[in-house]
Image (cartoon, rainbow, N blue to C red):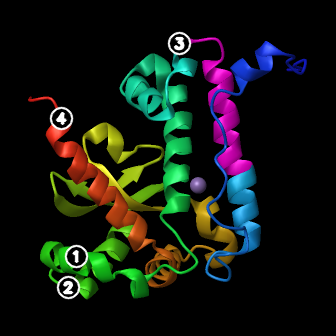
Amino acid sequence: MALEPPAGDERSLLMTFVLKPLPYGKTALSPTISATTMELHYEKHHRGYVEKLNKLTAGTAMSLLPLERVVETAWGDPNSAGIFNNAAQVWNHDFFWQSMSPTGGVRSIDRLAGRIDTAFGSYGAFERKFVESAVAQFGSGWIWLVADAGQLKIMTTGDALTPIVLGLRPLVTCDLWEHAYYLDYQSDREKYVRAFLARLVNWEFAVEQMAMGEARQPERAPV
Ligand code: MN
């Protein structure tokens, strides 16, 4: 289908949702995640979800909502499955990039170490459960550390599903779609997830997410 490039106001309507800039350069996570993977993952996959979401919502009420509200509104509506999948994938990728840092990994866990020990027994037990869960996720999806009413839990979701529609607060995530690791680790998802935990996971970001969730708690409407 040939589309004329939009002009003037039409362009701004089509560009409602934006590809957020990466929080670091494309070589910053190398060699754990190569620049080639970053280039393809961000410029093709992530950008593709943004562009598709803009197409699907152009001229509709959805295009006026913040991304998180689009995800929540489209969730569970069979007529909005395409919008949900693309909006949730945009949200998940924004969150994934922030879940990593060139100075992340186990060395940066200090401020969460106590909470991890409380929830899982030890860092080693947490790592085992995180890796096992990631490997057990069938097909494409995501692995998350979430706060469920203040309790830390590991969970996986399939395809685009995101914990924000399940009433859970994500703290960090790792992308389990093959496009996230195949060039660097081929079919070895376990090695990729172990490297993510060892060298990339941004525990400072997790602490910030948890603090935001706890600050928000009193504002929740009574059920
Ligand atoms: Mn991805």
**Residue drawn at point x = 21 percent, y = 52 percent:** 214
Residue for badge 2: 122
Q: CA distance from mark 3 to mark 2?
A: 47 Å
Dot 2 and dot 1 residues touching (CB under 8 Å): yes
Q: Nearer the viewer, mark 3 or mark 2?
A: 3
> Does dot 1 land on a helix, a strand or a loop?
helix
Residue 202: image location, x then y, percent: 45, 71
Residue for badge 3: 61
- Dot placed on the residue nearer the N-terminal end, 3 or 4: 3
Marking on residue 220: 4
- Dot placed on the residue nearer the N-terminal end, 2 or 4: 2
27 vs 205: above or below: below
Residue for badge 1: 116
The verdict on label 1 being within 8 Å of ligand 1 is no
- For the N terminus, the quadrant is top right
Picture quadrant of residue 110: bottom left
- Dot placed on the residue nearer the N-terminal end, 1 or 4: 1
Q: What's the residue type where badge 4 is placed?
A: Arg
- For the C terminus, the quadrant is top left
Which is nearer the eye, 21 or 81? 21
